[in-house]
């Protein structure tokens, strides 16, 4: 492969590739995001490839050259299309039809129908409420209410081919930056766009760059934070899996703006596919001369490497992340000095989130006003969210900032399944909070959410229904935070332990109102006395649930009941005398001998001895054990 | 552990360190490679790595114990991870854990079975929330699990192992 040496050559290649792609008479895109692969999309892809590749006009997507510019059929593996609950997903062009839950045995039928220009009705998405069919999924409520900027290519292009990225103006932004702009001009454009850090903090990206740009140093670094550790979030994973070149280009733009010649991707090891695709992207960019020395003849040198995280939530904090990249324990340090002054190996360093970087190419190409046309004044642009939990359509979505929670959960998410009632959304991961239905019309932007006691975080949204116990969920987050506290600050290390201890007392029916008071007191101490964001926000899940769901805490403590029927300690096991055959199997299995009776007549459970383990219920063959 | 395998661990560790040019900042990557090969971090590997990188064994031990990915105990042939991230948690992942746990007989105080076949773990989030709740065995992701299905998967694997052992 010959290197691309100038902007002119890049534009020529782009024309060539996009022309070749436009000549495809049949393009079968099989979603190969983590969700669809788990649902079996690999076999579907292989089956399609087997079916199509014997055709004379089969075009191998990796072999796009001048010779292959001819009409042809192709099969590609794409990144995440977002509709994870309906996978494996297969998209057929030019018919523009999306098939859901595709199995290998459907492949031949899909292929034959596509050749005839027909659509297979049973495989297209049907709205669960109206049962309306949506062959063109873009028209379905899930996609219709979204705006794709960051996810523009995700699920459409082949993430393992730099050619498909170049075909759609790929690397045009960096080439514009290198040939027409000074670092300061690039920095100013990003400042003018109002882009704020997408990792959770929401700090203005342009300002952050400026601190590092004005530093005089022999070496600077740009680091991509791909340590998406929040449980319930997978936006960054999907972007890295679906459009890795966009993030690579973003790194180059940021590197040029701050004067760095080296970039490091820090990606968590739990994302093997993202790491693999990123490796391919970096290699392809190097082979094409888009990374390395004297890029596009501009004199700009830039190289990229990948570091894998090893499972520590605190490493999402920037100083801890840098310690981890340096091969140390990932423990945060006090700021100042800020990383922009003294970061990786003591050199000025900017750490940007995956999604922040993915926004850059289009901001450069379309200008800051374009970016500001989405979202709100203080939070411009779009944001990706991972919509999960008790909602009909789970998956990856992108919406303009300022969209309300109601639109997200009900219009896009399709509401709560199984006729259950909405209870809360957990937003922002362990540092965020739980919001009740009264907050559903709250806009999703940095400042509104902060006011509501939650935060946008990286964008994980977990919907909960009436069957979820808020207190138990808060305890769950405390367990997570306690385990992930790095142990440096006493308030966080000891405080989270004590808070978890009290939460356990509450769900085990052993707490008093005094405990609740103490819980709140500790929460405020941790907020005040912790060094990093993990500690400062550690109490958020508790404080936000106390704010909106205090009655549920009181139900546990004062009324001794769990309204959702989740917490074991409040459950009462009983034997229904009408169903009990008196076999005594349950009494034999009961670990504490709480069940007694005579054979062939109904048994009884002594609830003062019962430890609510549920063994009797699992043992009974007649369904006679009831839980209240 | 016999002397031969200890020697092998030491020479493997030396190779890993050499491949990374003894660069101390890549120690996490080195530990990942050792763990990938042995499924855990043997003590002799940690000691050898400290010699190769000219740092104290405590430094290496400190790093190995800080990150959740590393294990100082040998693991089973199948590493069963039940995701207990938020999305999986609200969809009752705990019950899946309990159901799988019931199928296993552990070494006292450990999460690895007596026969060395399974290690049971929970993970905070695998990022597969769209298809929650999930279970991962080695690298295979099982989507939208329920307690019965998860227990069934374990049973099938255990059965396959006893059958192949009998054949030999």
Image: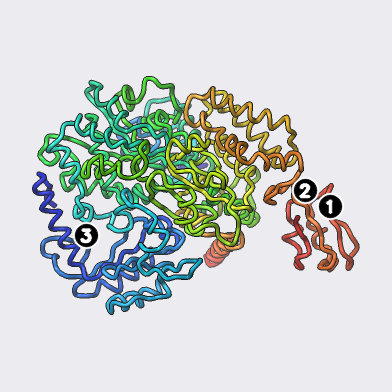
In the image, is residue A202 above or below residue B54? below
Q: Which mark is residue A62?
A: 3
The x, y position of residue A388, in whole percent, is 49, 52
Tell me the chain of label 1: A
Circles 3 and 2, Cβ within 8 Å, touching? The answer is: no
On what subunit does the disc labeled 2 rest?
A
Establish whether labels 1 and 3 are both on one chain: yes
Same chain letter for marks 2 and 1? yes
Of callouts 3 and 2, the N-terminal one = 3
Judging depth in this view, the residue of A496 and A421 nearest the camera is A421
For mark 3, name the chain: A
How far apart in space, not on screen, are marks 3 and 2 (Cα)? 62 Å
Confirm whether residue B145 shows in the render. yes
Secondary structure at numbered mark 1? loop
Disc 2 target residue? A611
Whether label 2 touches label 1, CB < 8 Å: yes
Where residue A360 is drawn, which disc sits there?
none
> Could one spot residue B15 in this view of the protein?
no
Instruction: Give the distance between the C-alpha atoms of the residues marked 2 and 1, in whole angstroms.
Output: 9 Å
Local packing at callout 3 (Cα closer than 10 Å; few below 14, some 14-19, many 20+) is: few
Of all residues, the one furthest to the right in this rendering is A598
Q: Position of residue A25 (x, y in %)?
A: 21, 70
Residue at label 1? A594
SS category of the residue bearing label 2: loop
């Amino acid at each position: 492969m010959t290197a691309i040496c100038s902007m002119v050559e890049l534009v020529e290649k782009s024309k060539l590739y996009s022309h070749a792609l436009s000549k495809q008479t049949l393009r079968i895109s099989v979603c190969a995001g983590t969700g669809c692969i788990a649902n079996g999309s690999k076999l579907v892809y292989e089956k399609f490839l087997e079916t199509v590749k014997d055709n004379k006009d089969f075009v191998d997507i990796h072999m796009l050259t001048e010779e292959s510019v001819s009409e042809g059929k192709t099969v590609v593996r794409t990144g995440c299309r977002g509709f994870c609950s309906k996978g494996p997903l297969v998209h057929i062009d030019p018919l523009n039809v999306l098939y859901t839950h595709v199995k290998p045995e459907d492949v031949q039928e899909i292929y034959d129908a596509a050749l005839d220009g027909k659509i297979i009705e049973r495989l297209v998405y049907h709205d669960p409420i109206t049962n309306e069919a949506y062959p063109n999924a873009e028209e379905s409520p899930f996609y219709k209410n979204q705006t794709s900027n960051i996810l523009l290519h995700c699920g459409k292009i082949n993430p393992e081919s730099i050619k498909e990225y170049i075909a759609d103006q790929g690397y045009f932004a960096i080439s514009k930056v290198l040939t027409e702009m000074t670092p300061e001009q690039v920095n100013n454009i990003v400042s003018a766009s109002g882009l704020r850090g997408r990792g959770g903090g929401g700090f203005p990206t342009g300002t952050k760059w400026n601190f590092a740009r004005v530093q005089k140093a022999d070496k600077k670094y740009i680091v991509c934070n791909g340590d998406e550790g929040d449980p319930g979030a997978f936006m960054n994973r999907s972007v890295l899996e679906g459009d890795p070149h966009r993030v690579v280009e973003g790194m180059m733009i940021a590197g040029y703006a701050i004067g760095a010649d080296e970039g490091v991707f820090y990606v968590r090891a739990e994302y093997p596919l993202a790491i693999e695709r990123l490796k391919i992207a970096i290699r392809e960019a190097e082979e094409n001369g888009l990374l390395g020395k004297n890029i596009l003849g501009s004199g700009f040198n830039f190289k990229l490497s990948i570091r894998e995280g090893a499972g520590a939530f605190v490493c999402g904090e920037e100083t801890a992340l840098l310690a981890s990249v340096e091969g140390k324990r990932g423990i945060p340090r006090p700021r100042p000095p800020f990383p922009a002054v003294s970061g990786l190996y003591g050199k000025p360093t900017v750490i940007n989130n995956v999604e922040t970087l993915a926004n850059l190419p289009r901001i450069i190409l379309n200008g800051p006003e374009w970016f500001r046309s989405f979202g709100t004044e203080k939070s411009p642009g779009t944001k990706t969210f991972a919509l999960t939990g008790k909602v009909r359509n789970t998956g990856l979505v992108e919406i303009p900032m300022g969209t309300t929670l109601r639109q997200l959960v009900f219009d896009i998410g399709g509401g709560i399944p199984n006729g259950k009632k909405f209870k809360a959304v957990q937003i922002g991961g362990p540092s965020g909070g739980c919001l009740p239905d009264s907050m559903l019309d709250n806009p999703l932007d940095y400042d509104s959410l902060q006011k509501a006691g939650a935060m946008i975080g990286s964008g994980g949204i977990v919907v909960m229904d009436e069957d979820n116990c808020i207190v138990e969920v808060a305890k769950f987050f405390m367990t997570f935070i306690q385990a992930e506290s790095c142990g440096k600050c006493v308030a966080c290390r000891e405080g989270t332990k004590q808070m978890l201890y009290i939460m356990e007392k509450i769900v085990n029916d052993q707490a008093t109102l005094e405990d609740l008071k103490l819980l709140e007191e500790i929460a405020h101490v941790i907020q005040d006395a912790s060094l990093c964001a993990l500690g400062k926000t550690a109490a958020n899940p508790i404080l936000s649930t106390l704010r909106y769901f205090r009655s549920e805490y009181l139900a546990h403590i004062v009324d001794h009941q769990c309204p959702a029927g989740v917490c074991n300690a409040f459950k009462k096991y009983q034997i229904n005398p009408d169903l009990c055959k008196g076999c005594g199997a349950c009494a034999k299995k009961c670990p504490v001998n709480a069940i007694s009776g005579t054979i062939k007549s109904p048994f009884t459970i002594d609830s003062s001895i019962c430890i609510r383990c549920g063994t009797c219920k699992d043992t009974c063959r007649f369904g006679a054990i009831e839980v209240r | 552990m016999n002397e031969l395998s200890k020697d092998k661990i030491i020479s493997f560790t030396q190779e890993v360190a050499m491949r990374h040019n003894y660069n101390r900042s890549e120690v996490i990557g080195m530990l990942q490679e050792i763990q990938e090969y042995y499924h855990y971090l043997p003590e002799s590997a940690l000691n050898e790595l400290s010699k190769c990188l000219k740092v104290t064994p405590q430094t290496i031990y400190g790093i190995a114990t800080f990150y959740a990915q590393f294990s100082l105990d040998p693991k089973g042939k199948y590493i069963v991870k039940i995701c207990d991230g938020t999305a999986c948690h609200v969809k009752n992942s705990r019950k899946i854990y309990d159901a799988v746990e019931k199928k296993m007989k552990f070494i006292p105080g450990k999460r690895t079975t007596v026969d060395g076949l399974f290690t049971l773990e929970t993970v905070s989030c695998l990022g597969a929330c769209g298809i929650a709740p999930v279970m991962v065995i080695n690298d295979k992701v099982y989507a939208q699990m329920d307690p019965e299905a998860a227990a069934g998967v374990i049973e099938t694997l255990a059965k396959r192992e006893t059958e192949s052992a009998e054949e030999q």
